[in-house]
Image (spheres, rainbow, N blue to C red):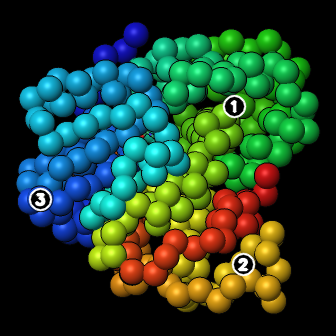
């Protein structure tokens, strides 16, 4: 197993400015990871309830929680945060995988470090090997296309099915490279999109994000702040459309409620800020930050919207 490197928090000063935590306030960190955001919020004097679905992240955080009575750790998905907290002044979400998850070969997220084909954040449910060794070729292709924007999804799926059973991340990476061609000078490894797509699918990440945003809408007090950092366009689109919808910038859209009978709603978010991207200095110092986007907004006093917000409303092609 590789030693995990510390996770460098992305857009930390910008997230902190958006959350504006103050002594006596209660904030949620929905994606604890290595605790970079939680530590900064605690440093501002606020109380933090931090969630992570990864039991390893919660275990690693126990020492900090033992030393800091204003920190509570919860092993759960952030989609469930409303079951644990109520009336908070801030919610932060930093979507995706941590450096620890990527670097720990036995978690199976990385095509650079060989490990078992796992990729489960919560360490439960179907593994990447289960999925790739049993799914129909057309389903694999659809997942690679929808969640990886992989233009050669059908060819890669064909190669995967021909190479079954697959058990190791290095095997999967080799199959993808064989399917699409690979030379050492390439800017991006051709396996990147395939690994991203399978991870997003297995962990239901887009549905999680849509549900997490609605949970934040429920628990934020009037004047409470939401800050969300995403790492690719599928996720950013979900956050952007949610804030447009809930900020009253676009009409409510739902597959379940026709426009003509959808109740007219007061905006639940205001002061929706323009997307913030890492500075060139941050991108140079932390290459993982390059694809990050922060969006933030402030909760109004309007009741939470009764209209469900689904990731699939956003044109994801699953
Ligand atoms: C990018 S890291 C967060 C890093 C953190 N902000 C820091 O500064 O250390 C994302 C973390 O969120 C967790 N995570 C991802 N999706 C989640 C979900 N739906 N619910 C709870 N935790 C989740 C992952 O397990 C991972 O530990």
Spatial separation of the CA atoms under disc 3 and disc 2: 37 Å
Looking at the image, is 198 positioned above or below residue 256? above
Sequence-wise, the earlier of marks 3 and 2 is 3
Ligand 1 image-quadrant field: top left
Q: Are marks 2 and 1 in contact (CB under 8 Å)?
A: no
Sort mark 3 into few (<14), some (14-19) or many (20+) by Cα contacts within 10 Å.
few
The residue that disc 3 covers is 24
Instruction: Say which quarter of the image contains residue 189.
Output: top right
Query: Quarter of the image containing the N terminus?
Result: top left
Residue at (59% x, 65% y) in the render: 238
Residue at (29% x, 44% y) in the render: 49
Q: Nearer the viewer, residue 318 or 164?
A: 318
* Residue mark closest to the camera, 2 vs 1: 2
Residue 253 tag number: 2
Q: Are marks 3 and 1 in contact (CB under 8 Å)?
A: no
Looking at the image, is 69 positioned above or below residue 9? above
Whether residue 69 is visible here, answered yes or no, is yes
Q: Nearer the viewer, residue 165 or 219?
A: 219
The residue that disc 1 covers is 177
Spatial separation of the CA atoms under disc 2 and disc 1: 40 Å
């Amino acid at each position: 197993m590789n030693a995990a490197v510390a996770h460098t928090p992305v857009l930390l000063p910008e997230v902190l400015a958006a959350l504006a935590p103050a002594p006596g306030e209660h904030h949620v960190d929905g994606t604890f990871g290595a605790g970079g955001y939680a530590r900064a919020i605690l440093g501002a004097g606020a109380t933090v309830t931090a969630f992570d679905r990864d039991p390893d992240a919660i275990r690693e955080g126990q020492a900090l929680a033992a030393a800091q009575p204003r920190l509570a750790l919860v092993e759960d998905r952030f989609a469930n945060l409303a079951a644990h907290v109520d009336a908070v002044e801030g919610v932060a979400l930093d979507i995706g995988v941590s450096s620890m998850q990527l670097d720990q070969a036995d978690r199976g997220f990385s095509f650079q470090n060989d490990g078992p084909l796992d990729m489960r954040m919560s360490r439960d449910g179907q593994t990447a090997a289960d999925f790739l060794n049993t799914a129909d070729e057309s389903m694999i292709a659809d997942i690679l296309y929808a969640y990886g924007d992989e233009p050669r999804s059908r060819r890669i799926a064909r190669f995967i099915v021909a190479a079954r059973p697959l058990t190791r991340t290095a095997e999967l990476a080799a199959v993808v490279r064989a399917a699409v061609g690979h030379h050492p000078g390439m800017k991006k490894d051709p396996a990147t999109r395939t690994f991203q797509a399978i991870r997003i699918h297995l962990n239901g990440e887009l549905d999680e994000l849509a549900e997490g945003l609605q949970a934040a809408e429920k628990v934020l007090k009037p004047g409470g702040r939401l800050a969300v950092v995403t790492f690719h366009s599928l996720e950013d689109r979900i956050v952007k459309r949610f804030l447009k919808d809930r900020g009253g910038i676009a009409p409510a859209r739902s597959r379940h409620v026709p426009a003509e009978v959808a109740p007219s709603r007061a905006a639940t978010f205001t002061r929706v800020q323009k997307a913030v991207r890492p500075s060139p200095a941050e991108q140079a110092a932390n290459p993982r930050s390059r694809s990050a986007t922060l969006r933030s907004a402030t909760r109004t006093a309007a009741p939470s919207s009764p209209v469900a917000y689904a990731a699939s409303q956003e044109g994801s092609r699953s």
